[in-house]
Amino acid sequence: MLGFAQWTVLRRHVARAAWWLWANAAAWAVGMPLIFLGMEYVPWTGPSAATLLAIYGVCGAVGLVVGAIHGRFLVELVRPRRS
């Protein structure tokens, strides 16, 4: 859903904006399994500070991965095409 909303804005500025839909799908196809995998290692029965730190760590790491994939696609989308 979010990728579609972003595409509606991006298409006004970038010729190949439809690729953003694929980029978003690819980024989250990698990100979501990492979230589920990472949450398996959260110490749910430990101290609440450790639990919160682990959750923030997992979400931050996944955010970096998803952001890197999005960023790579965006760089390609705004790069002028060679003729």
Image (spheres, grey):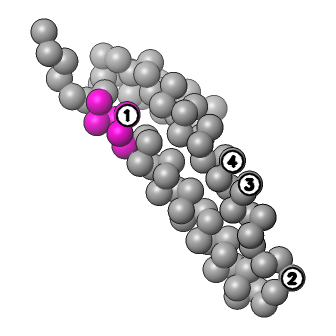
Distance between mark 3 and mark 1 Cα atoms: 24 Å
Q: What residue type is labelled 3?
A: Phe
| Residue holding disc 4 | 33
Nearer the N terminus, badge 2 or badge 1? 2
Q: Can I make out residue 5 in this image? A: no
- Give the main secondary structure of the magenta stretch: helix
For badge 1, the amino acid type reads: Phe
Q: Point out the residue furthest to the left here.
A: 83
Q: Position of residue 54 (x, y in %)?
A: 66, 75
Q: Is residue 70 left or right of residue 81?
A: right
| Residue stretch rendered in magenta on the structure | 71-76
In the image, residue 72 lies at what x, y percent? 35, 39
Task: Say which label, 1 or 4, has the lower sequence index.
Answer: 4
Q: Distance between the residues labelled 2 and 1?
A: 39 Å
Amino acid residing under circle 2: Thr
Give the residue drawn at x 55%, y 27%. Answer: 4
Which disc number belongs to residue 36? 3
Reading the image, the residue beneath label 2 is 45
Badge 3 or badge 1: first in the primary sequence:
3
State yes or no: discs 3 and 4 in contact (Cβ < 8 Å): yes
Give the left or right position of residue 65, taking residue 37 as reference.
Answer: left
Q: Which amino acid does label 4 sit on?
A: Pro
Q: Which mark is residue 73?
A: 1
Residue 19: in magenta span: no
